[in-house]
Image: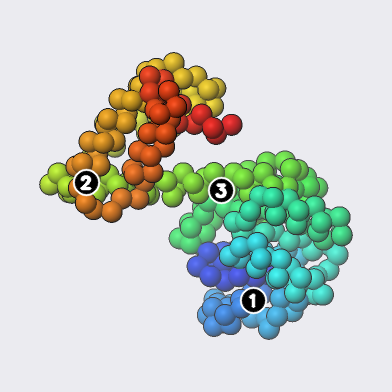
């Protein structure tokens, strides 16, 4: 039986802990809101009174925390109870520069630390599904790889650059958040034309969204602005979208329009829509 600790038992942390208990691991939990940790006693978890108590005697520590400041605070609090051989796996979504500084400092001080953010929701966590990204010393990853592969269906080791998983996590979340905002605007526009959200969603069946992302993404990354869809024409379409939405609040389209206007004013109207990434690299 592997003895592990989860520090941070919000929606995701609690789901990870439940899954580990169902796999037969011995699990100690801690959370600043004690009631959230105590709720896991029903699944067999042991509740610790402090971060230091939570990590005493465990083989692996899993952090599932809100932000960098909280990660720093909790790591400082757990260190008195941390054994030299115990590895910390930080699943928190954090700022890349601060992640790199933290990982470099901790590993130099003899604290074994990996950054392991995830594309996993609570439901998937309970089933061992989803994707985990890992960055940090290869020797540490090799030591915990089997355990991580029980936690997620796909575990991607990205190498020893300590902030790379943090960068990829933010890129992925930008896609998720951006798509959600775009769908909201599509529904608002459709409603303005008397079309239901369910009807508007049918449009996705007419498009190869994955091909659009990969194709346009490669064009933008290569900085190839040979026109296939001129920016000025795309701006006209955005005007039509805004007119159709009427006076309803929009999440994304007004910002897109403003960016297009600035590029057109700069003389890029006849270039491809990909020129929207002109300043991206």
Residue at point 26%, 36% (across, down) = 239
| Disc 2: which residue | 245
Residue 68 left/right relative to 195: right
Residue at point 50%, 67% (across, down) = 11
| Disc 1: which residue | 30
Residue at point 43%, 23% (across, down) = 267
Residue 116 left/right relative to 83: left
Residue 170 left/right relative to 99: left
Residue count near mark 3 (Cα–Cα under 10 Å), binned few <14, some 14–19, many ≥20: some
Q: CA distance from mark 3 to mark 2?
A: 30 Å
Residue 80, placed above or below residue 180: below
**Residue lying at the far left of the rendered structure:** 194
Residue at point 19%, 42% (across, down) = 244
Residue 270, placed above or below residue 81: above
Q: CA distance from mark 1 to mark 2?
A: 47 Å
Q: How many marks?
A: 3
| Disc 3: which residue | 170
Q: Is residue 149 visible?
A: no
**Tag 2's secondary structure?**
helix
**Tag 3's secondary structure?**
helix
Which image quarter: residue 1? Answer: bottom right
**Tag 1's secondary structure?**
strand
**Residue lying at the far top of the rendered structure:** 226
The tag on residue 68 is none
């Amino acid at each position: 039986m592997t003895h592990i600790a989860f520090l941070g038992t919000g929606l995701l942390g609690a789901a990870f802990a439940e899954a580990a208990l169902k796999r037969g691991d011995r699990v100690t939990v801690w959370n600043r809101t004690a009631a959230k940790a105590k709720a896991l006693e029903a699944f067999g978890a042991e509740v610790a009174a402090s971060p230091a108590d939570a990590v005493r005697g465990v083989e692996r520590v899993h952090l599932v925390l809100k932000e960098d400041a909280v990660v720093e605070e909790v790591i400082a609090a757990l260190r008195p109870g941390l054994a030299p051989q115990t590895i910390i796996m930080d699943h928190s979504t954090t700022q890349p520069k601060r992640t790199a500084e933290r990982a470099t400092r901790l590993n130099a001080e003899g604290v074994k630390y990996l950054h392991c953010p995830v594309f996993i929701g609570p439901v998937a966590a309970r089933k061992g599904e989803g994707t985990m990204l890992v960055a940090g010393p290869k020797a540490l990853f090799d030591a915990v790889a089997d355990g991580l592969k029980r936690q997620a269906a796909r575990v991607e080791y990205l190498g020893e650059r300590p902030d790379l998983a943090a960068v990829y996590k933010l890129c992925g979340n930008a896609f998720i958040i951006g798509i959600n905002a775009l769908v909201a605007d599509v529904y608002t526009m459709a409603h303005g034309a008397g079309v239901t959200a369910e009807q508007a969603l049918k449009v996705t069946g007419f498009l190869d969204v994955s091909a659009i992302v990969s194709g346009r993404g490669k064009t933008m990354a290569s900085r190839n602005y040979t026109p296939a869809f001129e920016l000025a024409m795309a701006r006209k379409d955005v005007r039509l979208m805004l007119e159709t939405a009427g006076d309803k609040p929009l999440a994304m389209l007004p910002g897109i329009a403003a960016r297009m206007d600035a590029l057109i004013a700069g003389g890029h109207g006849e270039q491809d829509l990909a020129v929207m990434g002109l300043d991206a690299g």
